[in-house]
Image (cartoon, rainbow, N blue to C red):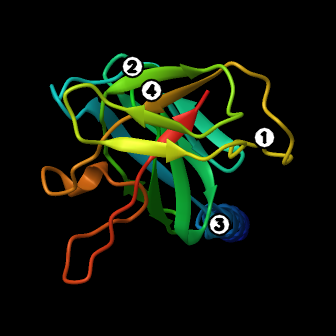
Amino acid sequence: MKKRALLAVASMLLIISFAALLGSCSSSSSSDTAAPPAATTGKVVGKVSSNLTGTAIANAMVTAGTVSAVTGSDGTYLLDNMAVSNNTILTISASGYAFTSKIASVTAGNTSRVDVALQPVAASVSIASLATATLLTVPASSAAVQLEANALVTALSGTPAYPVTASITPIDPSSNPQLMPGNFTTSTGSRSRASGRWK
């Protein structure tokens, strides 16, 4: 009789121990499977290269609002923690190349790709004064920009400190529409825009 009682107690303890083990497993697995928080930002990646040679451009600056990145030796960049938007403006600049801008669509938890081809600067002109109108030209090209007298102002609408340098680059969208700033696309009624940068 004592043996049966001891077996019954031992069996009961074994069942209780097994139930406790199962309980601890189920509670830990339920916490392990909790859903991660939903993503609220996205990423933009891409490569910056020369339109003429196709080679990667290192040390180009890619900026979107307060987020920026410098391209590596292979021309690639990563903008992380970008706010969600269908029209995020990227500005891209590199020494010796015409400044440009592109539009990116940033979606939560996803990575968008924006590759950029930059056109080398065709001519740089130093302007000592704009007391009178000045015509800027590109050698061996019909491209020209007419600057009216006193046409240049700073971002705060003040008079710039002369001399200033004007970099001029003719862009032919028929050779590569991606050279155009923004989200230019060729279609009937397409528009043409000039791009320049004052230093």
Residue type for callout 4: Thr
At label 3, the amino acid type is: Thr
Q: Residues within 10 Å of mark 4 (few under 14, many from 20)?
A: many
Would you say the residues marked 4 and 2 are in contact, meaning their CB atoms lie under 8 Å apart? yes
Where is residue 124, by image quadrant? top left
Earlier sequence position, callout 3 versus callout 1:
3
Q: Which residue is mark 3?
A: 40
Judging depth in this view, the residue of 41 and 160 nearest the camera is 160
Q: Say left or right for 141 vs 64.
A: left
Number of the label disc, if any, that sits on residue 154: 1
Name which of mark 1 and mark 4 comes first in the sequence: 4
Name the residue rendered at 70%, 70% in the picture. 12
Which amino acid type corresponds to the residue marked 2 in the rendered image? Ala
Distance Cα–Cα, label 1 vs label 4: 28 Å
Which of pointers 3 and 4 lies earlier in the amino acid sequence?
Answer: 3
* Residue 148 seen in the current view: yes
The mark that comes first in sequence, 4 or 2, is: 2
Q: CA distance from mark 3 to mark 2?
A: 30 Å
Q: Nearer the viewer, mark 3 or mark 4?
A: 4
Q: Mark 2 falls on what kind of element?
A: loop
Residue 47 figure quarter: top left
Residue occupied by mark 4: 71
